[in-house]
Image: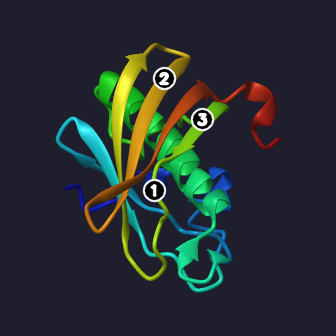
Amino acid sequence: MSKKAFQDCYPDELSHCYGCGKHNHQGHQLKSYWHGQQTIAHFTPESFHTAIPGFVYGGLIASLIDCHGTGSAAAVAFRNEDRAMATLPAIRFVTGALNVNYLAPTPQGVELELIGFFSEIKERKIIVDIVVSANGVVCAKGAVIAVKMPQSMTIR
């Protein structure tokens, strides 16, 4: 596993995301890494991420899938250009579509593991399929259609 998270390679002006931005200290601070040809992230929900006592709020799971998916898309785009993620110009992706299927209740107080697989890689669109597990049990599966960030979203 790489020592530096994908999200830690984003330029400062693109590091404010609630889910994964290193400059958003109220956010999740999700960190994604290469794991062979797949990607991996871990996250331990806090007590305030509760749906009902003992179980994680589904919106958190969707948020984690979203951010792991867009971060993974950026990582594979850099890899395909044979460049390090911290090099300029930055390559960032945003969510074009997000699909989440909840398969089992996600227990509170357990580290979640997210594994990303690439089902489609194009220059402007990458589809990342993500499996979320807790204690080895698959709790959710999601698909992120990540699209290259439009120029209109850059900070001027």
Give the camera-side residue of 111 and 107. Answer: 107
First reached walking from the N terminus: tag 3 or tag 2? 3
3 or 2: mark nearer the eye: 3
Total count of labels? 3
Name above or below for residue 2 compared with residue 156: below
At x 50% / y 39%, what residue is drawn? 142
Left or right: 37 as drawn, with respect to 19 = left
Identify the mark at residue 126; answer none if there is no mark.
2
At x 42% / y 47%, what residue is drawn? 86
At x 61% / y 57%, what residue is drawn? 12
- At label 1, counting other C-alpha atoms closer than 10 Å, the crowd grade (few under 14, some 14-19, many 20 or more) is few
Per the image, the residue denoted by label 1 is 104
Give the camera-side residue of 15 and 19. Answer: 19
Give the camera-side residue of 126 and 136. Answer: 136
Q: Is residue 93 visible?
A: no
Residue 8 location (% of width, % of height): 45, 59
Separation of residues labelled 3 and 2 (CA atoms): 14 Å
Whether residues under marks 1 and 3 lie with C-beta atoms below 8 angstroms apart, the answer is: no
Residue 11 location (% of width, % of height): 56, 51
Q: Is residue 90 visible?
A: yes
Separation of residues labelled 1 and 3 (CA atoms): 16 Å
1 or 3: mark nearer the eye: 1
- Which amino acid, mark 2? Ile
Identify the mark at residue 99; answer none if there is no mark.
3
- At label 2, counting other C-alpha atoms closer than 10 Å, the crowd grade (few under 14, some 14-19, many 20 or more) is many
Q: Secondary structure at mark 2?
A: strand
